[in-house]
Image (cartoon, helix red, strand yellow):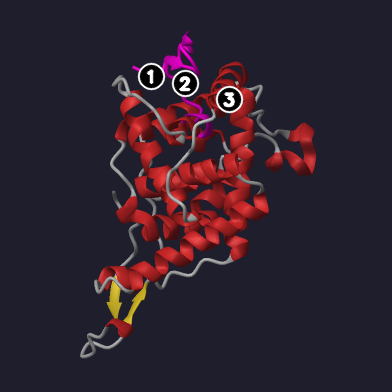
Amino acid sequence: MNAPQFRGALITNQAEAHSSLGALYIDVSLVKYQPLNEYREVGRCLSARRRQEADEGQSHATAEKLGLLFDSLVPDTPDLLKAYGLRCSEIAQSETHNPQGNSRYGLFANEVGADGTTIWAAATSGTSSIAIHLLACMLSRMWDTPEAVSIWMELITDRKNFLSQSGKRMDFAASRVELTREEISNWHASAHAWRLTADQANEPKQRQLLLIIDNLGIPVSGRTRLGDSVIDTWITAMITVDKLVRGEAQSIQIGAPLLGLASWHLYPDMIVFGRGRDVTEVKLKDSLIQ
């Protein structure tokens, strides 16, 4: 996947004659990607304050840094990313779920509507950052905010440690990216707010999908260590849902793809094999699924 771009050299020697790893640093003067077309309505429908934050503020920097840290883990899932962008754009254009602020809201006009800040920040930071937003939605679905933020910090620490020891100059430089708990808390809060809005916007299908997941009661991941389990669940979900979106039938026996569907609000038709010999065909009729 494409890692965030930087103005000037991404990796710079502090001294021309010194080529040791310790001399490398990240130039954090960030530039923006052109977003995928499927996400453009999200940016268009953001309030002015949220648009500025996503374009130029800390949310954009956080999206860039997370995309850089996790880039080499992100699978290639173009159909999922496009479908997710279309779903987000549907919600962004809904007057019910994303009312536009105007003069009658007074000082609160910029706070009205759905919080798509992290989506637009990610969309303008590259596809790896969009994948990180998908991870944020999964963590929001699974854990309360304090636990989710703590898991984020653990994932970041693990990733930085891995990159710093890989022996590769690019990895070492990426490992020196700094992300504070406050920055991650703000990132999570925006993704969580969006996920709640998307739940409401897709309420009938979402309720039916969650009932199926609850009734099946299958494990999300077989990994025992929490950080490994989260990453494994995220990657497995992205790969499987990408196939589902483009119309490839999948036999799902672990909960990761179902968690992905519930977190990203995509609804393929299913044949559900319950306990015993129960077989149920579920038609969710999602126009974004081929």
Tag 3 residue: 210
Disc on res. 17: none
Give how far apart the Cα atoms at labels 2 and 1 are: 7 Å
Checking the image for residue 289, the label placed there is 1
Q: Amino acid at mark 3?
A: Leu
Towards the viewer: 188 or 47: 188
Q: Amino acid at mark 1?
A: Ile
Are the residues tagged 2 and 1 within 8 Å (C-beta)? Answer: yes
Label 1 crowd bin: few (<14), some (14–19), many (20+), radius 10 Å: many
Q: Which residues are magenta?
A: 261-290
The secondary structure type at the circle numbered 1 is loop
Q: Nearer the viewer, mark 1 or mark 3?
A: 3
Say which quarter of the image contains residue 57: bottom right
Residue 152 placement, left or right of 174: right
Residue at image mark 2: 267
Image quarter for residue 37? top left
Please tell me which of labels 2 and 1 falls first in the chain. 2
